[in-house]
Amino acid sequence: MRFTAIALAVLAGATAADAQFSARTAPVGNPGGNQNLVPCGQYDDGSTENALGLIAGGEMAWLHHFTSCPGTIGRIDTAYGSAMFPGGVTNGNNSKIFVHTDTDANPNNGTTWLATVLTVVTNGDTDILNPNPIGPSVVNGSAWVGASADQVAGEFPGPMDQNSSGPQAWVVGSTAGPGTLNERILSSNNVPPVQMTAIGFPAYWLLRADDGSGPIGTPECFGDGTGTNCPCGNNDGPAAGCSNSTGSGCGLTAQSTLGGTLDATNAIPGQPGLFFQGDVSIGGGNGIVFGDGLRCCGTNVVRLGVRVPNAQGFASIDDVQNRGGAQAGQTKCYQYWYRDPNNSPCGLGFNLSNAVSITW
C-alpha cells in the first residue's frame, strides 16, 4: 500500500510511528464533523488545535476536496501553523495556493490543475485566514484546493482543526527541499497525497474556498413553512425549497461572477432542470403550490437554460443577466425547476428550489 511506503510517525504522545509527517501533540476533539454545519466552501470552525509538518522539512501542502459547491472558485483562504503552538512556522517563507478540478475524490487518480498563485506565509501561528484571489476557476462542483509552505525540520505549517474531521482533508509533500512540491501533478511528489484520517491525524484544515465575489440578490420563498406551506407536508429548513426525494430541498444562490451565476444544490443527480427568470415574486415572495414544491417567480417568464445536475446534485448557469435580458436597475426573480421522477414526496415528479430576487 502507498500508505505503508510513506510510514507516518509523530512526536511523543501521538499514535503513529516512523512517519514523514509530525504534528504538535494536542487532544483530538469530536472527529467526524458534518460539512453541512458550516458555509459552502468551509469545513473548519475557525480555530486550530494542532499543526502538521514534514519531519525532514521541504515543502508540504494541505488539501480540501469540495463537492456540490462552490461551482466557481475565485479565492482561497488559509491560515499557517497554529495559535496553540507559537513558533512553528516562519513568516515570509514561500507558499503556493492552487486549485484543481476532478471527477472523483482521490487526487492520486489524476486531477486537472487550473491555477496557482505564489505568495508567502503571513500571520503564522495566529489562526488568521489570509485571502488569496485566484481565478475565477470553474470547477463544475468538484474541486481540490490547496495551500503549501516551505519549511525546515521542526516546523509545522499545516493548520489543523481537530474539532471535526472527514475524508475531504488530505496532505501531500516533497522532502527534496523548499520549493520542490509539484502542485500541478500532486501524485508525482515523493510524499504523495494521503487522507488525514488515514495517517492517524483526523482533522480539517483552516483552508476555505469561495467564488471571490460574495453572493448577490435576496433569497426568498423557502420551503420551511414561514410562508406558503409545501404541498404534502414536505417542508424543509431555511435556505432551500420543499423537500425532494433526497429528504431535503434544493437550494438556490446567486453570485456576481461571470455576468451573474446561479448555483443550485441538492437537486436530483442526472435529472434535468430549468433555470428561469420572472418579473415578479409570486405571493409577495411566499410562492404558490406547484408540483412537489412552490412556484415563486412569474410574469414574462424567460427560460435561461436547462442544466443536468452532477452526481452531487449541483447545477449552475452563468451570464444570467444577459440570458434574461435584464437591464441595470431592474429587479428580477430567479428559480430552478427540476425533475424528481422517483419517489418524490407528493408523487408529482417535479419540484423547485427557493427563489432569489436580484436588482441588477
Image (tube, rainbow, N blue to C red):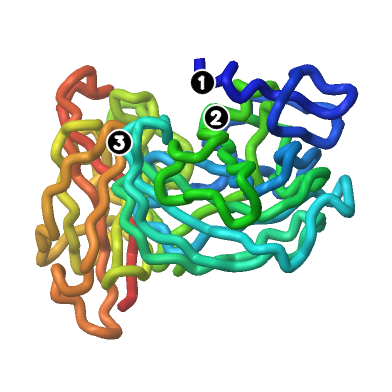
- Closer mark to the observer between disc 1 and disc 2: 1
- Looking at the rendered image, the disc whose residue lies closer to the viewer, 1 or 3, is 1
Residue, disc 1: 2
Answer left or right for 63 relative to 277.
right
Q: CA distance from mark 1 to mark 3?
A: 21 Å
User: Foreground: 294 or 167?
Assistant: 167
Indicate the position of residue 27 as horizontal and vertical percent values.
85, 28
**Image vertical order of residue 164 relative to residue 114, above or below:** above
Q: Give coordinates of residue 85: x percent, y percent.
A: 88, 46
Q: Verify CB contact (< 8 Å) between mark 1 and mark 2.
A: yes
Measured in 3D between alpha carbons, the distance from the residue under mark 3 to the one under mark 2, in whole angstroms, is 17 Å
Going by the picture, which residue comes out furthest to the bottom? 328
Q: Secondary structure at mark 2?
A: strand
| Residue bearing the label numbered 3 | 103
Whether residue 311 is situated above or below residue 284 in the rendered picture: above
- What number is the disc on residue 194? 2
- Bin the neighbour count of mark 1 within 10 Å (Cα to Cα): few under 14, some 14-19, many 20 and up: few
Indicate which label's residue lies in the foreground, 3 or 2: 2
Where is residue 199 shown, x and y percent of the image? Answer: 65, 23
Residue at figure coordinates x 27%, y 72% from the top left: 259
Residue 206 image position (x, y, % from top left): 66, 48
What amino acid is at disc 2? Val
Q: Is residue 326 left or right of residue 30?
A: left
